[in-house]
Image: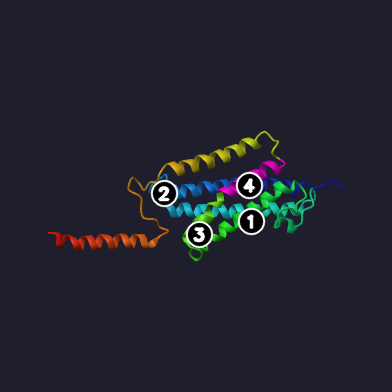
Amino acid sequence: MTHDPTFWIIARASGLVAYGLLTASVLLGIVLKGRPFGRSVKPAAITDVHRFTAVLGLIAIAIHGTSLVLDRTISITPLALLVPGLIPYRPLWTSLGVVAAEAMLLVYVSFSQRKRIGARAWRRLHWTTYAIFALATLHGIAAGTDTTRPWALPMYGAAVGAVLAAAGWRALVPPTQGGTAREPNRDRPGALHRLRGVRGRGAEVAPAGR
């Protein structure tokens, strides 16, 4: 009886799609924070695409894991998709994939819990996306069976290069606001109120100085 490679092909394809969507989500997050297009692109629109890309990535990961369980090339249990180290095939590198997937899910869930956990903790949690991307890259290169194909390493190299370039740009170039000064941080709604209060007091003091 010959082995049906359908689930194995789906697992490989969905893993590559998930990595591409993760890369896109990370890049969109950097664009959202840096705002290279000023006011020509609304941050709300980028946020929606960013979140949608993330959820598509999670769906691709779910398909990837389910296909690996259904395939008979390697014996993988559903529990092994949740607990790092239980997959017999290259356990170290597959464990990195498990950790990356769980961390990605945690970051996505944090979107709806932002007010509860606080803006500062939420931002710190989102810094882990760089680590998630690094773990996913190592997982794909070391555990992926397509790594030996001619297009695989250039694909990973392009993804890593794009993220590094975008992160470096974000660190060196200040955010733009359509040519105007940076607006108050939206994560701190009290900042605008305090700014207005200071301006109001300045207007009250001005007549006394005359």
Q: Is residue 135 magenta?
A: yes
Considering every residue shown, the one lying at the far left of the view is 210
Residue under numbered circle 4: 136
- Judging depth in this view, the residue of 124 and 33 nearest the camera is 124
Q: Is residue 11 visible?
A: no
Residue located at (42% from left, 44% from top): 36
Q: Which amino acid does label 1 sit on?
A: Glu
Between residues 2 and 99, which one lies in front from this camera angle?
99
| Label 4 packing within 10 angstroms: few (<14), some (14-19), many (20+) | many
Judged by depth in the image, the label closer to the viewer, 4 or 3, is 3
Q: Magenta residues?
A: 130-145
Circles 3 and 2: CB atoms closer than 8 Å = no
Q: In the image, 43: left or right of 16? A: left
Q: In this view, does 162 lie above or below 86?
A: above
The earlier-in-sequence mark between 4 and 3 is 3
Going by the picture, which residue comes out furthest to the top? 150
Q: What element carries label 1?
A: helix
Calculate the distance from the C-alpha at mark 1 to the C-alpha at mark 3. Answer: 18 Å
Per the image, the residue denoted by label 3 is: 121
Judge left or right: residue 192 versus residue 127.
Answer: left
Q: Distance between the residues labelled 3 and 2?
A: 27 Å
- Residue under circle 1? 102
The mark closer to the camera, 4 or 2, is 4
Q: Which amino acid does label 4 sit on?
A: Ala
Q: Give yes or no for residue 190 being in the magenta stretch.
A: no
Q: Nearer the viewer, mark 1 or mark 2?
A: 1
| CB-based contact (under 8 Å), mark 4 and mark 3 | no
Residue on which disc 2 sits: 41
Mark-to-mark CA distance, 4 and 2: 29 Å
The amino acid beneath tag 3 is: Ala
